[in-house]
Amino acid sequence: MLNLEEIQTELEELKKARKEGLPIAGWRRKALKLFKALCNGNKEKSPYEAAKSLSKRLAFDCRAELEKYFINFGFNDEGEKDKWQEMSNHLRMIYSS
């Protein structure tokens, strides 16, 4: 089950890491922690299943921060890229509705 407080905390930590200029490894760790929290750690389940209950603002902020990260540092593999594209599209649908 998605814990919205956990998502909010992970998002704030990622923003802080980026703004304070943490080393790349620190920023990566924070970004992937948020991404995994949104994906709910279930690789079999569609990533957006875990993100369904996000508010428009939280969906927008999560997408924006993760987009900054992935644009700068890329993806580990095609699986991560595919999962991000699916999640990104779903987050966009949440805050665009």
Image (tube, rainbow, N blue to C red):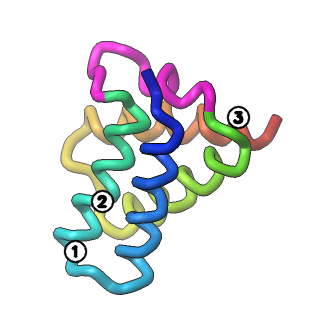
Q: Amino acid at mark 1?
A: Ile
Quarter of the figure with residue 27: bottom left
Q: How far across and how far down the image is residue 18, in percent?
A: 39, 76
Disc 1 secondary structure class: helix
Residue at the farthest top position: 44
- Report the predominant secondary structure element of the magenta stretch: loop
Q: Which residues are magenta?
A: 41-53
Kindly report the distance in space between the C-alpha atoms of the residues bearing marks 2 and 1.
10 Å
Q: Is residue 44 left or right of residue 14?
A: left
Q: Which residue is mark 1?
A: 24
Q: Amino acid at mark 3?
A: Met
Closer to the camera, 15 or 6? Answer: 6
Q: Residue at x 43, y 21 (%)?
A: 1
Q: Is residue 75 left or right of residue 87?
A: left
Disc 3 secondary structure class: helix
Quarter of the figure with residue 53: top right
Mark 2: few/some/many CA within 10 Å (<14, 14-19, 20+): many
Residue 93 - label: 3
Q: Is residue 9 above or below residue 25?
A: above
